[in-house]
Amino acid sequence: MAYLPAYRLKLYRNFKAIDPADYHGIIRYYERFEEAMTALDTEEYFDCTLNYTNALFETGNYPQHVVMCDHLLEIVIMQNIENWGGEDIYTRLLFKKSVALYRMHEFAKSEHVLRELIKLDPCEKLSIRLLRRCLIRQRSNTLMYTRAIAVALTFLAALAVAVELFVIRPFFLDYYEKALLVHNLLLGAALLALAGGEMWQFWRCHRMAAGFAEKLRARRN
């Protein structure tokens, strides 16, 4: 369908008149006139679509936000748009996409995007920090193993308490202190296994993220 220039101007003007903080209003307007939006000039269409994509992010519609990020990234590449609003629009879109994927619990996909971002700028602390968080949320085999050990030790500690209450105290009171010691040792070992696994996971992921960035910085230098 052909849209007259006056209609396109009115469409764009009305969109820009919406309060930038009225994210739901931006989404409603864009989706109501989505077909007509494609008739706008490239810069106008990109401006409207970028604001719509940001509104999706701010309202928590992360799946749709990721789809629109991919669409905008395609436009950025095809139209060779380097800066928008005084910032690198390509890296901005990639970072917002990685955050949306993280909040969707798509940690592996978010990690992939973040690695590409860090390749572009190995000194970007926000990307490195989010990469570390993605790695932490992806539980390693070691972490799962230590958690399993902690659960098993906790179960044994509970079993020791039951034996202590129903067997040792009524019939073998002389062994009560030893039984109490066994119970405390099992519970302490469970806590150590759990804490050790979590600390190992954090240290390992911190080193992986920092090491990845350091390697890229060294290569660039």
Image: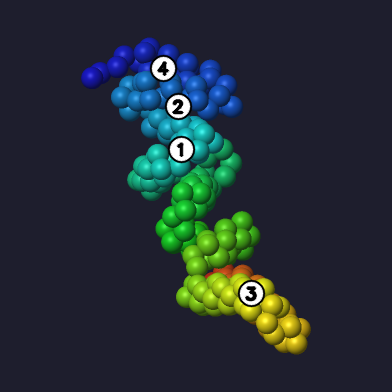
Q: Is residue 9 left or right of residue 185?
A: left
Q: CA distance from mark 3 to mark 2?
A: 65 Å
Q: Nearer the viewer, mark 3 or mark 1?
A: 3
Residue where numbered disc 3 is placed = 166
First in residue order: circle 3 vs circle 1: 1
Q: Earlier in the sequence, mark 4 or mark 1?
A: 4
Which mark, residue 172?
none
Q: Position of residue 109 (x, y in %)?
A: 42, 58
* Residue at 68% from the left image edge and 82% from the top image edge: 171
Q: Give the CA distance from mark 4 to mark 1.
A: 24 Å
Tags 2 and 1 touching, CB below 8 Å: yes
Q: Residue at x 23, y 19 (%)?
A: 1
Left-right relation of 172 to 48: right
Q: Nearer the viewer, residue 30 or 122?
A: 30
Residue, disc 2: 27
Q: Is residue 154 above or below residue 31?
A: below
Q: Mark 4 is on which residue type?
A: Leu
Q: Nearer the viewer, mark 2 or mark 4?
A: 2
- Measured Cα–Cα span from mark 4 to mark 3: 79 Å
- Kind of residue indicated by mark 1: Asn
**Above or below: residue 212 compared with residue 112:** below
Asked if residue 130 is positioned above or below residue 1 in the image, the reply reads below
Whether residue 166 is visible: yes
The residue labelled by disc 1 is: 61
Per the model, the C-alpha gap separating discs 3 and 1 is 55 Å
Dot 4 or dot 3: first in sequence order is 4
Pick whichever of labels 2 and 4 is earlier in the sequence.
Answer: 4
Q: Secondary structure at mark 3?
A: helix
Q: Name the amino acid type tagged 2.
A: Ile
Judge depth for marks 3 and 2 and give the one in front.
Answer: 3
